[in-house]
Image: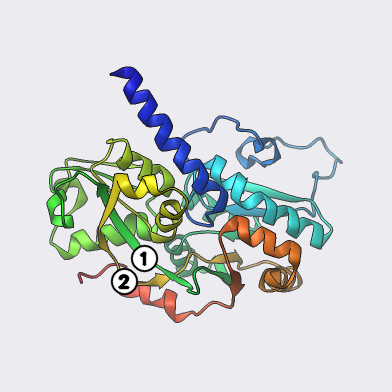
Amino acid sequence: MVDRHRKKSALVWGSLVILALVVLLAGCEGRQEEKPGQERLLQLDNLKPLPAGQAEPDAQALRVGVGAILSPQGTVLSYQPLIDYLGRKMGTPAILVQRKTYQELNDLLARNVVDLGFICTGAYFDGARKGELSLLVVPQINGKITYRAFVIVPVASPAKKVADLRGKVFAFTDPLSNTGYLCPLSLLQGMGQQPETFFSRTIFTYSHDRSMAAVMEGIADGASVDSLVYDLAVKRNPQIARQTRVIWESQDFGIPPVVVPRDISPARKALLKELLLDLHLDPEGKKVLTVLGVERFEEPELKLYKSLRRGPCPLP
């Protein structure tokens, strides 16, 4: 039994590595073990004071924060080519900054420690409400700048709707995740329920690929995930579709955006925006977009994000 379970776990995680190579989105647990390539990360919680009179290393470096939509190893594989590209174009070192939770990355953006952030829609709404973040651009995927929440279950589950998950174990991603928490929470509240009493137990996985794996491995009876992450996973590995199915999906939301701190210098903001909007026009930039699973970056439509003020997931 143990060997069979180990083989099943290896198959699940092996399939999700493919997703990490192409997925943009997205949105970590405790202290992460160092993975290949992570020596290029800047761990801001481990910085030490500099000796008096010594300048901060890479003071002009471009620091790019990526929300924990994917697990850390998936984030490095997906985003490092873009970060390297931006650094070359700007003539400065470029550093990937990761955090366990969406809130931690929002805090770095609010303090202007990170120059550019790839965050989830819920995290943007929270930061914008506090006056800490500014929309820069949004990715276009499959010709759209919107996405949805999917509630998924194991393919053999008898559940056909969310109400059928009463008394089950449910996986959320992050407390600031729109599709991974705020949306299903709003859905439950619309049913007159709360997760603490509706489900037997809930867990936070801190990334959408981990939530998918939790369902596939039988750790959770259901999960709410980013539709873009799920669709790309299924596209790259049909085994995921054979092991899970969608029992509910939300209306469209504004896609997880690219943001900058409210206090970033106007010149730096303008340059970053120009580089991202023109990325699809550059042959090298097209390769970067392919790794991300993005067609191009576009100007944001503010109305898609203002709609969150009315609540993320009304009942259909």
Check disc 2 and give the amino acid type.
Gln
Dot 2 alpha-carbon crowd within 10 angstroms: few under 14, some 14 to 19, many 20 or more? some
For residue 51, what is the image quadrant?
A: top right
User: Residue tagged by mark 2?
Assistant: 251
Which residue: 16% across, 55% down? 160
Check disc 1 and give the amino acid type.
Arg
Seen as rendered, the residue at the extreme top is 2
User: Residue tagged by mark 1?
Assistant: 148
Instruction: Residue 51: tell me if it is visible.
Output: yes
Display coloring: rainbow
Q: Position of residue 239 (x, y in %)?
A: 37, 45
Instruction: Residue 269: tell me if it is visible.
Output: no
Q: Position of residue 141 (x, y in %)?
A: 51, 68
Q: Is residue 231 left or right of residue 273?
A: left
For residue 5, what is the image quadrant?
A: top left
Q: Is the C terminus in the top left, top right, bottom left or bottom right quadrant?
A: bottom left
- Is residue 98 shown above or below 193? above
Do the numbered discs 2 and 1 sit on residues whose CB atoms are within 8 Å? Answer: yes
For residue 293, what is the image quadrant?
A: bottom right
Q: Secondary structure at mark 1?
A: loop
Q: Position of residue 209 (x, y in %)?
A: 43, 46
Q: Is residue 236 left or right of residue 81?
A: left
Residue nearer the viewer, 36 or 260: 36
- Is residue 256 shown above or below 177? below
Mark 2 or mark 1: whose residue is earlier in sequence: 1
Q: Position of residue 292 (x, y in %)?
A: 59, 57
Q: Which mark is residue 125?
A: none
Residue nearer the viewer, 50 or 3: 3
Dot 1 alpha-carbon crowd within 10 angstroms: few under 14, some 14 to 19, many 20 or more? many
Which residue: 80% across, 62% down? 89
Which residue: 44% across, 60% down? 228
Q: Secondary structure at mark 2?
A: loop
